[in-house]
Image (tube, helix red, strand yellow):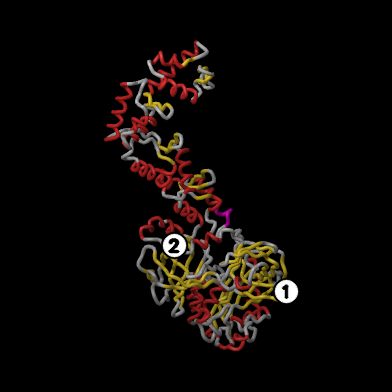
């Protein structure tokens, strides 16, 4: 199905043209009939000679109803810009034309209506004027039809053009993220709540469970209808009526969205939108920091505050990045187009593209971390994926741009291209930018060294000590640690992490305490002071002892003693030698060899039992399970 949206000044005959083409009067409201102008969106359908369907969305032309025009235009494939021959190009002609460009509609044509009210010479002048005005837009080079909805003149050529549209216009793509912005909502007896809109992004099917925005409540699709035909499923680009069960009618309001997304709670938590904003030439004011504006996206219209990224203001005919915090929930994906208007007086300022969703307004000191937004203004998917890898050191591949106007296949293809080119790498389901990771590793090493600069005797940091140095949430911090270990940036020893190649050194008061302890251990190599006695000197002595243990300078025997490593090795060598020549070792053997009492001999043998060098059998020791190792 091709969706054609009308645009143009009030009373230029948009609805009359649609009625003559389809036989359906899109002015459905009594008020519209009485006032002779379209107030709300109207709909009509045409079947081409080839059997394809064309849906017409007839939008209001009066300045007061421009918001309804935007709601309709956001879901169209082709625009039909109508200009009356007797009036020519008027203010709403210009405003609608600017909105067409801002919404990124890339196909259309022009109809000069009411040719029965104008002379042929004037028609030629008007046609030249229109041709000049549409230069450089999606309408540049498009056909301009001269018609009269009153007499039917010129409609043969217009109908012939419409018959060819399904073969020349690219329909809405299916990127696996279905959503339908509600433009009408009502209750039908025996059916329940019904909503209508132009389906975007993905398919909907009968029986499917969907989420209703902004309530985030779930509902089940009872039936689907397009052009008064019941269908089991509907593809993107179709004007669709959806009846739902399991949802209250109060949750089905114009401006809401029907979606198959599972990540809408995340969007609710990230309701500050980074926007690329372009102001039209006719904008009466610049956008300044903290200005209040209306943002219109889909059928949603919401007021909120603007804050600017890197400038004092965005002037007419210029572009910039801004942050918008809506007063009410707004459903917008990265890549979506929107319109910006002043709340009062109601006038269009410009529009643009959603660049990202953030949890809160950024602070000035955070703006450097948001420099990736500049990359996104190009609108190219490749640049968008690159910017996502600049936004965070690691991105879970399955979550990359999940709230963007692109399919997972498209995103995956761009990631694969980056990996192939060497710009990105994969690690256990995560993706990262190679150059950014190098910088991140260097920054982390600097932070690590600074953290232990006055603790050079410490052999590494515990997990809870090292995580804060990574400046990310626990999930990403733990993956970064795993990656740094795999790349040799870090080494893990026991339950601690240390920079690869970092030596342990002592200085100051800790070294003084170390030297005193070392002197005592050398003076009594097999009868050292107890560990509590050595540690009684306080925190400095305890740090010195920890260094001596972690550096391998001493061996900790149970909870009571420290032996110099060479002394302990001598004890272990004697035990091995004795058990190699005899099957048993007595406590007295140890006492006689080293001149020690049971106070030392028993803890030593209990330690050798623990490490498997020996095994107790009654009053003797025999070879343990690890004797040969």
Place residue 253 in its image quadrant.
Answer: bottom right
Secondary structure mainly formed by the magenta segment = helix
Q: What span is in magenta?
A: 407-411
Alpha carbon separation for disc pair 1 and 2: 44 Å
Front residue of this view, candidates 590 and 380:
590
For the residue labelled by badge 1, is the local secondary structure a helix, a strand or a loop? loop
Residue 31 visible in the snapshot: yes
The foreground one among 368 and 608 is 608
Q: Is residue 586 above or below residue 328?
A: above
Q: Residues within 10 Å of mark 2 (few under 14, many from 20)?
A: some
In the image, 163 versus 245, the foreground residue is: 245
Quickly name the residue at label 2: 360
Label pair 1/2, CB-CB below 8 angstroms:
no
- On the question of residue 435 being in view, the answer is no
Where is mark 1, residue-wise? 190
Between 465 and 592, which is closer to the camera in this rendering?
A: 592
User: Which residue is at a point 40% across and 68% down the rendered structure image?
Assistant: 318
């Amino acid at each position: 199905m091709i969706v054609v949206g009308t645009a143009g000044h009030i009373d230029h005959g948009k609805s009359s043209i649609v009625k003559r083409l389809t036989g359906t009067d899109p002015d459905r409201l009594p008020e519209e009939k009485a006032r002779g102008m379209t107030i709300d969106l109207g709909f009509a359908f045409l079947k081409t000679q080839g059997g394809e369907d064309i849906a017409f969305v007839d939008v209001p032309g009066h300045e007061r109803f421009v918001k309804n025009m935007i709601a309709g235009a956001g879901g169209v494939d082709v625009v039909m810009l109508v200009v009356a021959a007797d009036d020519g190009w008027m203010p709403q002609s210009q405003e609608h034309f600017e909105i067409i460009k801002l919404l990124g509609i890339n196909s259309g044509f022009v109809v000069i209506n009411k040719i029965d009210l104008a002379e042929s010479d004037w028609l030629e002048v008007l046609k030249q004027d229109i041709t000049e005005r549409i230069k450089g837009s999606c309408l540049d080079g498009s056909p301009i039809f001269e018609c009269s909805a009153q007499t039917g003149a010129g409609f043969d050529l217009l109908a012939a053009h419409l018959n060819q549209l399904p073969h020349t216009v690219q329909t809405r793509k299916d990127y696996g993220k279905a959503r339908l912005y509600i433009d009408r909502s009502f209750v039908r007896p025996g059916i329940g709540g019904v909503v209508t809109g132009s389906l975007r992004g993905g398919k909907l099917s009968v029986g499917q469970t969907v989420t209703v925005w902004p309530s985030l409540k779930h509902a089940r699709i009872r039936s689907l209808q397009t052009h008064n035909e019941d269908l089991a499923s509907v593809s993107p680009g179709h004007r669709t009526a959806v009846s739902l069960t399991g949802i209250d009618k109060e949750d089905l309001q114009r401006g809401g969205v029907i979606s198959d997304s599972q990540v809408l709670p995340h969007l609710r938590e990230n309701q500050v939108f980074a926007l690329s904003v372009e102001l039209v030439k006719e904008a009466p004011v610049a956008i300044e920091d903290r200005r209040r504006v209306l943002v219109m996206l889909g059928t949603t219209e919401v007021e909120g505050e603007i804050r600017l990224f890197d400038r004092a203001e965005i002037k007419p005919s210029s572009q910039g990045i801004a942050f918008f915090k809506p007063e009410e929930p707004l459903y917008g994906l990265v890549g979506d187009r929107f319109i910006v208007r002043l709340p009062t007086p109601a006038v269009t300022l410009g529009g643009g593209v959603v660049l990202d969703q953030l949890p809160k307004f950024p602070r000035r000191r955070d703006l450097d971390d948001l420099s990736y937004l500049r990359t996104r203004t190009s609108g190219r998917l490749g640049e968008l994926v690159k910017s996502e890898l600049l936004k965070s050191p690691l991105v879970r591949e399955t979550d990359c741009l999940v709230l963007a106007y692109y399919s997972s296949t498209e995103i995956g293809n761009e990631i694969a291209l980056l990996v192939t080119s060497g710009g990105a790498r994969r690690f256990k389901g995560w993706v990262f930018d190679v150059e950014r990771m190098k910088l991140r590793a260097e920054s982390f090493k600097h932070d690590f060294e600074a953290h232990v600069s006055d603790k050079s005797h410490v052999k590494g940091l515990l997990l809870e000590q090292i995580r804060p140095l990574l400046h990310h949430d626990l999930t990403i911090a733990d993956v970064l640690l795993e990656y740094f270990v795999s790349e040799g940036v870090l080494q893990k020893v026991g339950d601690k992490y240390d920079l690869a190649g970092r030596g342990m050194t002592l200085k100051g008061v800790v070294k003084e305490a170390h030297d005193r302890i070392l002197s005592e251990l050398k003076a009594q190599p097999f009868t050292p002071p107890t560990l509590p006695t050595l540690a009684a000197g306080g925190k400095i002595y305890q740090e010195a002892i920890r260094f001596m243990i972690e550096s391998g300078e001493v061996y900790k025997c149970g909870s009571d003693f420290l032996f110099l490593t060479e002394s302990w090795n001598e004890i272990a060598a004697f035990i091995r030698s004795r058990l190699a020549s005899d099957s048993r070792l007595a406590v007295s053997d140890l006492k006689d060899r080293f001149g020690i009492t049971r106070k030392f001999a028993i803890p030593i043998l209990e330690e050798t039992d623990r490490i498997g060098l020996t095994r107790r059998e009654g009053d003797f020791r025999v070879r343990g399970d690890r004797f040969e190792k």
